[in-house]
Image (cartoon, rainbow, N blue to C red):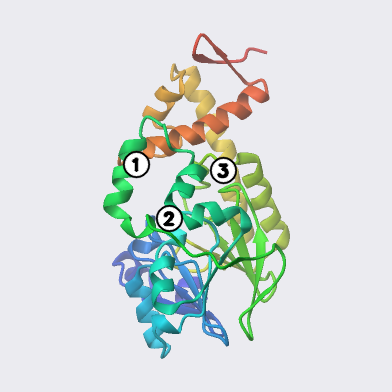
Amino acid sequence: MRQRELFGITPIQIAMSDYSKHIEILPNVHLVRGENAARFPEANTLLIDDEILTLVDAGSSLQNISSTLKDLNHEISDIQRIVLTHFHIDHKGYAADIQKIANCELICHSLAEIGVRTFQGLIELYGIEGHKYYTTWQSYISQRFGHVMGNYNVTSTFTDGKPISCGENDLIPIHLPGHTIDHTCFGINGYDTIFLTDIDLTNFGPWYGNKVSDIEDFKKSVERVIDLRPSMGISSHLIDPVLDDIDERLRKFRRVFDEREKRILDNISKGYDTIEKLSQKPTIYPRIPKDVYFVFEMFMLEKHIHILESNGKVVEESGHLMIEKR
């Protein structure tokens, strides 16, 4: 049985974006799907309907979260705990709004605190202040994401590997940096089922467009998940859990790093010999829908170029990148 059929969703329904707001993926563990097929700025949320009613992330729309709670005979005020996987806006999302209603715990990784607590802290971890596109980014955020610009009340932090008990279900934090410095996935009652967060297995591939992102750490994190050999991977940006060929899906996701490196070298050889020119191509994103995306395109390119220079594959002379001749 294919995974879409397993969860009661046919290909026709998905094409029409007519999918249920939530599905039960394990006993009392529900995937609250993001709108627009969970594409950014939406993200999936997990709801653990247990002794301690727990949300993992709060990036799904409030409507979808509220609807799921209602179907399970709860309301937002019943939420007792929110666990955040990392500080990004599509993951901390509506946590502050929910916390004001539910007066619940809000816990995150200690490395996430600065980016969760305040908007200025988030800006610092993004590393975006002073960038040529900073004003464009700030305007975009204020127009689209006003709910993330206030303060969040972090009540405590979790420890890597130490289970967070919800009652019958345990969440096991797996600190897997690279996407961000604090990026954490969660095993559910072990490691056979893992909330992969933004090791998201989407066709875009890995994203590492912040100051606190790291390519080499990201590669190691993907390899660590491969070594854990999960049977189910739950992505923050796919509406169905991944059950089929998860090992190969992870390896394909990992190969994108190398594919991008080859593309960068090819584009430099064609005369796109500065970060600016490479970003205008573009080289990481297939296209740039808004100017604000140039920020992240450039960050990711800079990280690749740094590695290519360190490995002796690229040199910079008079402000221009060149392929190192062997």
* Number of numbered discs: 3
Please say if 225 is above or below 64: above
* Foreground disc of the pair 3, 1: 1
- At a point 60% along the width and 27% down the height, the residue shown is 306
Task: Return the residue at label 1.
Answer: 137
Label 3 or label 1, whichever comes before in sequence order:
1
Q: Disc 2 residue type?
A: Ile
- The reply to whether dot 2 and dot 3 touch (C-beta < 8 Å) is no
Please say if 180 is above or below 78: above
The secondary structure type at the circle numbered 2 is helix
Foreground of the two, 72 or 116: 116
Please say if 240 is above or below 274: below
Picture disc at residue 89: 2
Q: CA distance from mark 3 to mark 1?
A: 18 Å
Task: Return the residue at label 3.
Answer: 213
- The reply to whether dot 3 and dot 1 touch (C-beta < 8 Å) is no
**Residue 183 in the image, given as x and y percentages of width and height:** 58, 55
Q: Which quadrant holds residue 76? A: bottom left
**Residue 218 in the image, given as x and y percentages of width and height:** 62, 46
**Mark 2, other Cα within 10 Å: few <14 / some 14–19 / many ≥20:** many
- At a point 49% along the width and 65% down the height, the residue shown is 153
Please say if 187 is above or below 198: below
Label 2 or label 1, whichever comes before in sequence order:
2
The secondary structure type at the circle numbered 1 is helix
